[in-house]
Amino acid sequence: MHTRAASWLRHRLGRAVVLAYTLALILPAPGLWLRRPHSLPPSHLALDTAPLLLSLVLFSAGLQVPVRALGALLRHPKALLAGLVLHLAIPLTVVPFLAFLLRRTPDTDGGSGLLTAMILVVAMPVAAGATVWTDRGDGDQPTMVGLVLASTLLSPLTTPLLLATLSPLLSGGYAHTLAATGRLAGNGFALTAVVLPCAAGLLGALVLSAQSLGRLVAAVAPSAMAGSLVLTYVNASGALGSVLTRPRPLLFAAALAVAALVCLLSFVLGGVAARVLRLEAGTASSLTLACGMNNSSASAVLITASLPDKPHLLLPVLAYGLLQKTAANRIISRLRQAPTAAGA
């Protein structure tokens, strides 16, 4: 039953995400309520919904990792090492270029708000959902799994490093805010909300028998997908909740344009690197997808935790989340058409 539920939801995930965005636009109140921490009586233990949902999603992703398939990747680590280098190099290349463009806009702070949001996106590890797109596009799954795991496990180091390196590009109070966010990421967010849940799932995949693991995945996977949709709704409520009451079309358009530019450049640079390295088609597609697919849910949760008074910063994050899935779909569609064209 759980397997059927997971399969049913997976095949309708795109429409479900659109529904979550629509609900956030027309009925944001429950999502705004869930964004706030709540105390559980009688212990008054603080319950923060968004990080818990993110942890559930990453735990489920860790459970489903084909850990034993990573041995070959470790013996031929060229794509893995290239992906990790690009994970650091792309933000250091794209963000300064974006800052250069935004300083030529009429925005009084040089677009520092939008730039802050994009920095928080590109500093996140590779999205666990990228493995789904790799599987659909017949890509190199061990390479993608390795990049997701390595970037996730290194995120307590890489995320604060990238935030500290890029914060001087910001003006006003945003530089101080981003530095404080980097300290939050380094002091526990990346570890407790990202690394530990993923590591717990990996441990389960390693130590459990195939039968026990199958039962656990069948129980957890549908809950994780539902949790991912609720997390999307909660994050979108924070960004879209004021759109109807206080419309800001220029901000919306700017957020979409900035997210599109960063997404496009990330995928293009990943594709160029794959060609320079002369990787096989499947490995090249995995590297390209990994470069463009960052964990936007984690960045949205981090913004909610560290910048609760700036929900508008979620707009470019949400736009990036949608655009990276659209770009990934285009990439795998071309990969599926390539063998047909070659055979013709």
Image (cartoon, grey):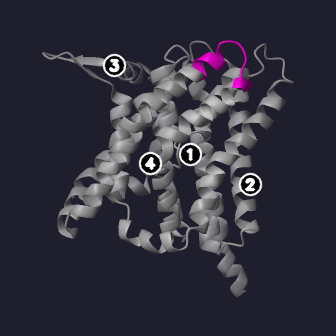
Cα distance in 3D space between marks 3 and 4: 26 Å
Amino acid residing under circle 1: Asn
Q: Mark 3 or 1 closer to N-term?
A: 3
Secondary structure of the residue carrying tag 3 is loop
Q: CA distance from mark 2 to mark 4?
A: 25 Å
Mark 2 touching mark 4, by CB under 8 A?
Answer: no
Provide the residue designation for mark 1: 294
Residue drawn at the location 57% of the way across and 41% of the way down: 321
- Quadrant holding the N terminus: bottom left
Disc 4 residue type? Leu
Q: Secondary structure at mark 4?
A: helix
Residue at image point 66% right, 80% down:
339
Q: Residue at x 29, y 18 (%)?
A: 38
Q: Residues within 10 Å of mark 2 (few under 14, many from 20)?
A: some
Residue beneath disc 3 = 37
Q: Is residue 261 above or below residue 85?
A: above
User: Which disc number belongs to residue 273?
Assistant: none
Tag 1 near tag 4, CB within 8 Å: no
**Sequence-first disc among 1 and 4:** 4
Q: Is residue 177 magenta?
A: yes
The stretch in magenta equals 168-178
Residue 175 locus on image (x, y percent) = 65, 19
Asked whether residue 5 is in view, the answer is no
Q: Earlier in the sequence, mark 3 or mark 2?
A: 3
Q: Which residue is mark 4?
A: 153
- Where is residue 29 shown, x and y percent of the image? 41, 18
